[in-house]
Image (spheres, helix red, strand yellow):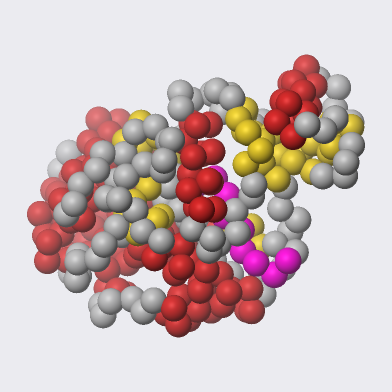
Amino acid sequence: MQNSSDDADAGAVAARFTGARATERRQVSGALCEVVLDDGRVVMVKTGDRPGAVRAEAAGLRWLAAAGAVRVPVVHGHDERRLVTDRVPEGPPTGEAALRFGRELAALHAAGAPAFGAAPPGGPEDAWIGLAPMRNTTGSDWPRWYAEHRVLPYLRRAVDQGTVRVTEAPVVERVCELLPELAGPAEPPSRLHGDLWNGNVVWGADGHAWLIDPAAHGGHRETDLAMLRLFGCPHLHGVLEGYQDVVPLAAGWRERVAVHQLFNLLVHAVLFGRGYAEQALDAARAAVG
């Protein structure tokens, strides 16, 4: 059992939002504490110190859960700094679970959103993707919205930091100019997880994939799928097969993967440096052929 004041505070927060007494606490990371309650439940208490981050995550989890599609941990409550959710017992990432996840992810996306860039109900307009700020400004035209509110803001940050050289920026700007041609058939806004790398997919002991740590917003469904591919996902072929069983992807989606990965690669370039900037530039070159 941890005896630090932070852990004691996490136990008190868990008790406040669940109505049960905390009996054990274990610090999982600097921001995450596992708390065992006296009724046998185990919850996670997550600390956020960025303005609006906890509210954005709580709203995102509830919005994803409201679709009744992919499994999402129950949100017990939150304040400005702490979020209390159920812990997900983990299991193996099996082929069967991957097929099921693909079908459920397709249903989540099909639940839709009011607009591209729409924040979850109750979520702030100024939200976060990982440690990077993400502004949920809405738009009705995906190519224009994606360029103006996802790709270009992070390109500018990366250039200002020196992570992307001024002479390299035009290849990304060229993608933005060509997006109306590169985007494929127009699609309605989908309900996105928004930061769907494999680390935010928990393979549950119940045989389902569970989603955590969303940067949820209205967007293009291929963006979530491109993120899954970017950092690797167990049984990705099965995930895509299950997805296409429910809502087939538009023709040419494989050729658009680099377009949809560009946003997340630029976010990573801003956060983690030159290696991701080079990947972003490679993606931009691939997108324009």
- Vertical order, 268 against 254 (above or below): above
Q: Is residue 211 magenta?
A: yes
Residue 211 in sight here: yes
Q: How many marks?
A: 0
Q: Residue at x 24, y 66 (%)?
A: 187
Q: Is residue 248 magenta?
A: no
Percent across and percent down for residue 146 are: 23, 50
Percent across and percent down for residue 152 are: 21, 42
Residue 157 quadrant:
top left
Which of 2/103 is in front?
103
Percent across and percent down for residue 273 are: 39, 40
Residue 33 quadrant:
top right
Residue closest to the far top? 5
Task: State which quarter of the image contains the C terminus.
Answer: bottom left
- Vertical order, 197 against 131 (above or below): below
Residue 237 in sight here: no
Task: State which quarter of the image contains the N terminus.
Answer: top right
Q: Residue at x 66, y 62 (%)?
A: 203
Q: Residue at x 18, y 43 (%)?
A: 148
Q: Is residue 152 left or right of residue 6?
A: left
Magenta-highlighted residues: 206-214
